[in-house]
Image: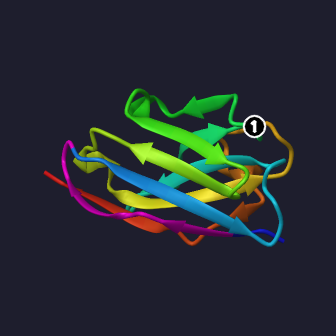
Amino acid sequence: QVQLVESGGGLVQAGGSLRLSCAASGRTVSSFAMGWFRQAPGKERESVAASSWSGGVTGYEDSVKGRFTISRDNTKNTVYLQMNSLKPEDTAVYYCAAKYGGIGSMRPDEYDYWGQGTQVTVSS
């Protein structure tokens, strides 16, 4: 079993930055692909970013490309999401997820473990 705990969310003005962290416990996630997803009120959960087991291959949803960066430190069993140039439409609950196998995916149904989420609110 893998437990994931997100942190780093909060309220920020448009144009600001936040860095989300996802700490894993229970077992090492160094062989897992990891992803970040978000869900805004009244909307379906959508992908944000994904990383291969090594962090060498990453993918991003189009609306966050060039603004968000996913990274991971396998020695700390932690994944990060650096979010810059935030916009009000980025407001959502952000979730991290772990997927067996080292290949990342932008499909939430392919992930095996989920955190409980952290709220990000961007004011205009």
Magenta span contains residue 12? yes
Q: Which residue is under mark 1?
A: 54
| Amino acid type of the residue that numbered disc 1 sits on in the rendered structure | Ser
Quadrant in the picture for residue 65? top left
Q: How many marks?
A: 1
Please identify the dominant SS of the magenta region: strand
Q: Is residue 17 visible?
A: yes
Instruction: Note whether residue 44 is visible.
Output: no
The residue at 83%/66% (across/down) is 27
Q: List x then y, in percent, for residue 122.
A: 24, 55
Observer-nearest of 33 and 23: 23
What coloring was used for the rendering?
A: rainbow
Which residue does the image show at 62% across and 64% down from the upper left? 23
In the figure, is residue 46 to the left or right of 76? Answer: left
Q: Which residues are magenta?
A: 4-15
Q: Residue 91 at what x, y percent from top left?
A: 32, 55
In percent of width and height, residue 33 lies at 75, 45
